């Protein structure tokens, strides 16, 4: 089966920032979460995938095709949501459908109407009068209405309340149910990914920190906590994002390393905690864990 998305050794340099030899794959039928702190390179990665930027080196394939040579064909198969409004303020929902649908051969009016109803969007109201949450709902509805086989989502749940985010998660899970459609989902709301993502790609400072299954990532890291006197030099070198106070210390550690320090409290971290603590790590021991080898 052809992967929905493949990146291999993709690099892009800007003044003050370098996306370095990034590589990961999104299999058909799965959801990949793209995570990392602000400035890590997530949006740059998405822009490269969508042919909005040209890589300095490496290659990108969408359903086996190079975006640089098959841009129009790929755009038919990819639905996109950015974190800012892409439509004209003076448009209504009906105007949006009329303008956007002409660019897609497989536009599904029935699907669009169903999503507009689910999201409770007024069809005749000007977009300029929409809240941020309503803007995001409209972009989601548009992305899901032209039979795209890959959704590329950059902060799609930004501005949505918990109820709507839960509905959106259900829509995505239903979207991939046939095993042929996939999602690349970049978000700072890690709890959304913990519920629905199959795979995680974690970028830090323009470098790949981890790519692999969510399950493997969660199993291979843990939180370690202890009293000040328990923080030995050997332990300190193993901890990512070490936080020390007068009361004690805590940080992230690989599960296999934690077993050597059995008398210290170990907890299961959330995905958000893994991202936060790993992003604090600096210096020569900064690690990179790929393809499930966390």
Image (cartoon, rainbow, N blue to C red):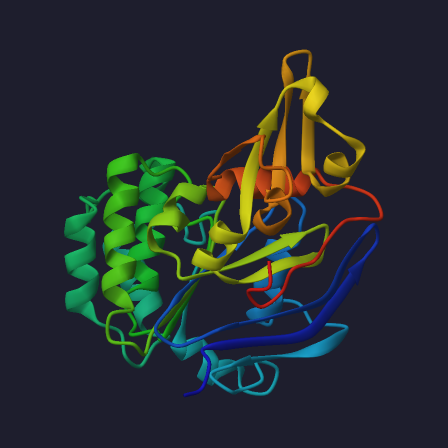
Image quarter in which the N terminus is found: bottom left
- Tell me if residue 52 comes above or below residue 251 in the rendering: below
Front residue of 213/28: it is 213
Please state the horizontal and vertical placement of residue 19, each as a whole percent of the image: 73, 60
Please say whether residue 2 is visible from this viewpoint.
yes
Front residue of 256/198: it is 256
Locate residue 25 relative to residue 287 in the image: left or right: left
Q: Which residue shows up at 46% across the image and 81% down it?
A: 3
Q: Which residue shows up at 60% across the image and 51% down it?
A: 256
Please identify the quarter of the rendering in which residue 47 is found.
bottom right
Locate residue 18 relative to residue 27 in the image: left or right: right
Front residue of 238/215: it is 238
Q: Which residue shows up at 68% across the image and 11% down it?
A: 246
Image quarter in which the C terminus is found: bottom right
Total labels: the figure holds 0
- Tell me if residue 20 comes above or below residue 140 in the rendering: below
* Outermost residue to the top: 246
Locate residue 27 relative to residue 164 in the image: left or right: right
Please say whether residue 37 is visible from this viewpoint.
no
Please identify the quarter of the rendering in which residue 146 is found.
bottom left
Front residue of 223/270: it is 223
Please state the horizontal and vertical placement of residue 216, each as a whole percent of the image: 48, 58
- Tell me if residue 125 comes above or below residue 168 in the rendering: above
Please identify the quarter of the rendering in which residue 252 is found.
top right
Q: Which residue shows up at 24% across the image and 70% down it?
A: 177
Please state the horizontal and vertical placement of residue 76, each as a whole percent of the image: 40, 78
Please state the horizontal and vertical placement of residue 65, each as a whole percent of the image: 53, 87
């Amino acid at each position: 089966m052809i992967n929905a998305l493949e990146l291999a050794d993709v690099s892009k340099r800007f003044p003050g920032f370098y996306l370095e030899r990034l590589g990961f794959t999104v299999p058909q039928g799965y959801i990949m979460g793209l995570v990392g702190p602000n400035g890590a390179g997530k949006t740059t990665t998405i822009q490269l995938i969508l042919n909005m930027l040209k890589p300095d080196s490496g290659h990108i394939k969408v359903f086996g095709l190079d975006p640089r040579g098959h841009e129009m064909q790929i755009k038919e198969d990819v639905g996109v949501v950015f974190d800012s409004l892409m439509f004209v303020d003076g448009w209504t929902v009906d105007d949006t459908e009329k303008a956007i649908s002409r660019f897609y051969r497989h536009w599904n009016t029935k699907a669009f109407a169903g999503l507009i109803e689910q999201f409770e969007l007024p069809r005749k109201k000007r977009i300029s009068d929409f809240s941020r949450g309503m803007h995001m709902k409209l972009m989601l509805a548009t992305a899901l209405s032209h039979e795209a086989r890959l959704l590329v989502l950059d902060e799609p749940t930004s501005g949505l309340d918990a109820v709507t985010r839960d509905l959106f998660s259900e829509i995505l899970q239903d979207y991939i149910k046939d095993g042929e459609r996939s999602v690349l989902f970049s978000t700072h709301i890690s709890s959304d990914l913990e519920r629905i993502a199959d795979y995680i790609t974690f970028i830090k400072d323009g470098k790949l920190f981890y790519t692999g299954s969510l399950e493997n990532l969660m199993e291979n890291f843990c939180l370690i906590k202890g009293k000040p006197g328990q923080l030995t030099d050997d332990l300190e070198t193993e901890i990512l994002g070490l936080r020390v106070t007068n009361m004690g210390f805590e940080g992230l550690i690989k599960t296999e390393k934690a077993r050597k320090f059995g008398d210290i409290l170990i907890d299961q971290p959330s995905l958000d905690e893994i991202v936060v603590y790993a992003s604090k790590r600096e210096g020569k021991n900064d690690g990179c864990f790929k393809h499930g080898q966390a």
